[in-house]
Image (cartoon, rainbow, N blue to C red):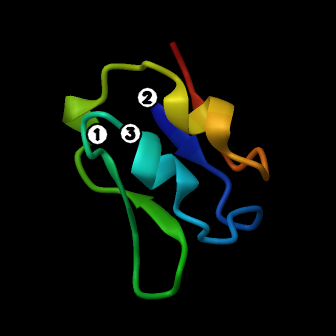
Amino acid sequence: MLKIHIERCKGCGICVAFCPKKVLAVNEIEKVEIVNEQDCIKCGQCETRCPDYAIFVEK
C-alpha cells in the first residue's frame, strides 16, 4: 500500500519517473497521485527517491 503526504509533495515527478510499473502520475494541481495501485510491486523506488519524504510504501 502506498501513502502520499500531499502537503509535502511539490510535484517534482521524480517518483513517477522511477516507478517501474507506472503506478504514479502528476495530476492537474501538480501533486502526485496513485493511478494503478494494484500494479505496485512495493519496490520502494518512489519512497527512496522522493526528496521531500512525501511518499511511503507500507509492506
- In contact (CB < 8 Å): disc 1 and disc 3: no
**Residue 13: x and y, percent?**
52, 62
Q: Amino acid at mark 2?
A: Met
In the depicted view, which residue is nearer to us: 44 or 56? 44
The label nearer to you, 1 versus 3, is 3
Which structural element holds mark 1?
A: helix
Relative vertical location of residue 17 with respect to residue 28 in this rendering, above or below: above
Q: Amino acid at mark 3?
A: Cys
- In contact (CB < 8 Å): disc 1 and disc 2: yes
Q: Residue at x 26, y 46 (%)?
A: 22
Q: How far is the residue under mark 1 from the one under mark 3?
A: 11 Å
Q: Residue at x 43, y 53 (%)?
A: 16
In the depicted view, which residue is nearer to us: 53 or 58? 53
Q: Residue at x 64, y 38 (%)?
A: 49
Q: How far is the residue under mark 2 from the one under mark 3?
A: 14 Å
How packed is label 2: few (under 14 Cα within 10 Å), some, or many (20 or more)? few
Relative vertical location of residue 25 with respect to residue 34 in this rendering, above or below: below
Instruction: First in sequence, mark 1 or 2: give its number.
Output: 2
How packed is label 1: few (under 14 Cα within 10 Å), some, or many (20 or more)? some
As drawn, the label of residue 19 is: 3
Q: Quadrant of residue 41?
A: top left
Q: How far is the residue under mark 1 from the one under mark 2?
A: 7 Å
Q: Amino acid at mark 1?
A: Glu
**Residue 36: x and y, percent?**
23, 46
Q: What residue does disc 1 label?
A: 37
Q: Residue at x 50, y 63 (%)?
A: 32
Q: What residue does disc 2 label?
A: 1
Relative vertical location of residue 9 with respect to residue 3 in this rendering, above or below: below
